[in-house]
Structures are given as C-alpha cells and as structure tokens.
Image (spheres, rainbow, N blue to C red):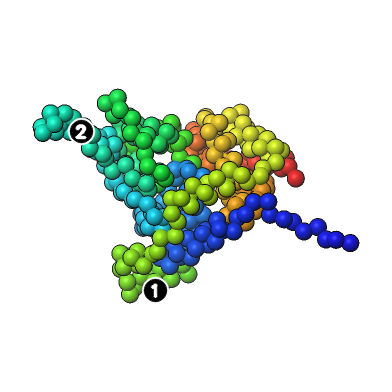
Amino acid sequence: MEENVFVQRIDLGTLNASVEAIRKEISKIIVGQHEMINMLMIGLLCDGHILIEGVPGVAKTLTAKLMAKIINADFSRIQFTPDLMPSDVLGTSVFNPKEADFQFKRGPVFSNIILIDEINRAPAKTQAALFEVMEERQVTIDGTTHIMDFPFLVLATQNPIEQEGTYRLPEAQLDRFLFKINVKYPSLEEEINIMLNQQALTQNALLEDVRKILSTTQIAEFRNIIQQIIIDPKLVEFIAKIVNETRHTPSLFLGASPRASLAVLKASKANAAIKGRDFVNPEDIIEMAAPVMRHRIILTPEKEMEGITPDELIQNIISNIEVPR
C-alpha cells in the first residue's frame, strides 16, 4: 500500500534559506530577542510598518539598523523631537534663483527603511504628516504627488516608561502599524553573552561585518509567494470572529478595525511561510493576533485600573471562540 506523502504546493526553499541566513547574520550581534526578529521579518514580507516598544538599551535601534544593512536598500534615521516640523520629515519646496522657480527638496522619509526613533516625542502635526506616506507610499506636497521607492518600511521605536514630553500617537496612525512589538529585557545568560560579544569590538565594528542578504527584487518575489499561501475559509472566519468580538466586548472602549483583520490574515500567511508551511493553521492566527491588535484596541478605564493588559484581553477573546480544525 502506498504511503500518503505530503507534497509542498508552493516552493518555499529560497524564502526559508534567506530567512535562516538573516537570523544567522542578526545573531552575530543581537543575542536573543527572537520574537522581535521574527516580527521584523514578517513585517518585511507583509509590507507592514512596525512599532517597537521597550525601555532604553534593549537593542531596538540596533536591530532596526541591522535589518536595513541586511537588505540591499537605502536607510534613513529620523530622531523625533517636540520641535520637529512636518517639513523636517517630508521635505520642502526651496526657491531656486537660477531657474526662478521652486524645487522640492526631499526629506529623510524618502528612503527604503526608515527608522523613527522615539516616535511619540513629536506633536500631532508632525505625526499627521506620516499618515499618507505610511498608508499609500506617497507624499503630496504643493499639489504634487511623489511616489516612494520600493520597498518602503517604517520601523518606529518608543519608550513605554518615560511619559514627560511625549504625545500619545493618534489612533489613525497606530492603525497603520502592522505590529506593535513589546521588547523585553534579556535573560541573565543572554546578558552575559551580550557583554562577551561586545567586549572586544565596538558596535560599529560589529555592524561592518554584516553582509547584505536580500535584494529588492527578492523582497518582491517573496511577497508574491506570501500571497499564494493557502488559508482555509474556516480560518478566515476564525480571524473575522476574533476581530469582531473586540467590538462587542464590554471590557473595550475601542475595538479593532477591518484593517486589523487583513493584517492578521497577511501576518498569519507570512508566519506559516517562514515556518516552512504553504498553508495557515490556527496556531499562526493565535500567534499573530496579539502583536497585530494590542495597539489597535483601547481598554475601558475600569479594566486599565484592574491592571488587565490588551494581550490578556485578546487571549480571553480567542479562548472563548471555537478553534477550527
């Protein structure tokens, strides 16, 4: 009797080899932080911006710089401050006396990988300047639309503890981030390894050793592969039920939007692909639900006072929905 052998319907060989090479390259410098690295790779494959939250010194900025070095693309870093104006980010029209005309001088946002450090330090006016470019990959200034080069990825960091001199990000902007990653402290063993790794070489010297792995053409190819990953209609319904439930639970003041449903769908496909599967299973969805929705929901003041976290609430919602098998 012939055995049933599972045949992979989509060739994930090149994608998985590249993901493994990226992990290996990052691990030369970053010790631990596996969840953050995984999420950054999924974000890149899904064309999604990422918000990274963690206390100072947990390698948020360094990991973002590393991602940019590994991809053969331009990198730009913008430090957000309370006096930063929209024109400091997007660019401005400058008068050219030779041609007696205004010419557009591009701002630092015109790059491939944009690292925005301490995004919550700039006021609402500057935050609003990012709305169009994050959603539509274009900037409109003085009636002229400037299309961003491919790929275009925003990695933004913020510190959850220090609230003085910071501004809460508008909900519309938070909704444009595919993930919010909570970066934790390293374990004792990891911290010892960090010190052993960096005692001989400076951070810049370590970064110089990093080799480029991904080209922009490969990123486009991998994104096409992600779209082909198979998902059962029952699992699509499972995603819709989870997101829909956030709008009806009395513990939440604000539920997740349809953009969240699409984000969970895309992220689950990418999660399956980097694990070497050409189909989505319920675990992929459960893993992606919290990072996709934790910044898109707002708890009621009562639940906040009880010390309930968005992640706990999302897990409670999932546990009350039947998982399709």
Task: Return the residue nearer the eye: 256 or 20.
Answer: 20
Rendered image quadrant of residue 120:
top left
Q: Secondary structure at mark 2?
A: strand
On screen, residue 252 versus residue 192, left or right, reads right
Residue 261, position in %: x, y? 58, 35
Q: Which residue is mark 2?
A: 103
Marked residue nearer the N-terminal end (2 or 1): 2
Which residue shows up at 41% across the image and 44% down it?
150
Which residue shows up at 17% across the image and 33% down it?
94
Most distant residue in the front direction? 99
Q: Say few, some or many: other residues with alpha carbon within 10 Å of mark 2 (under 14 / 14 to 19 / 20 or more).
A: few
Task: Return the residue nearer the eye: 301 or 227.
Answer: 227
Locate the N terminus by quadrant: bottom right
Q: Secondary structure at mark 1?
A: helix
From mark 2 to mark 1, how far is it between C-alphas?
51 Å
Q: Amino acid at mark 2?
A: Gln
Residue 45, position in %: x, y? 51, 48
Residue 196: image tag: 1
Residue 157, visible in the rendered structure: no
Locate the C terminus by quadrant: top right
Residue 323, position in %: x, y? 71, 42
Residue 146, position in %: x, y? 33, 34
Which residue shows up at 59% across the image and 40% down it?
265
Q: Say few, some or many: other residues with alpha carbon within 10 Å of mark 1 (under 14 / 14 to 19 / 20 or more).
A: few
Task: Return the residue nearer the eye: 121 or 277.
Answer: 277
* Tag 2 near tag 1, CB within 8 Å: no
Q: Amino acid at mark 1?
A: Leu
Which residue shows up at 33% across the image and 65% down it?
208
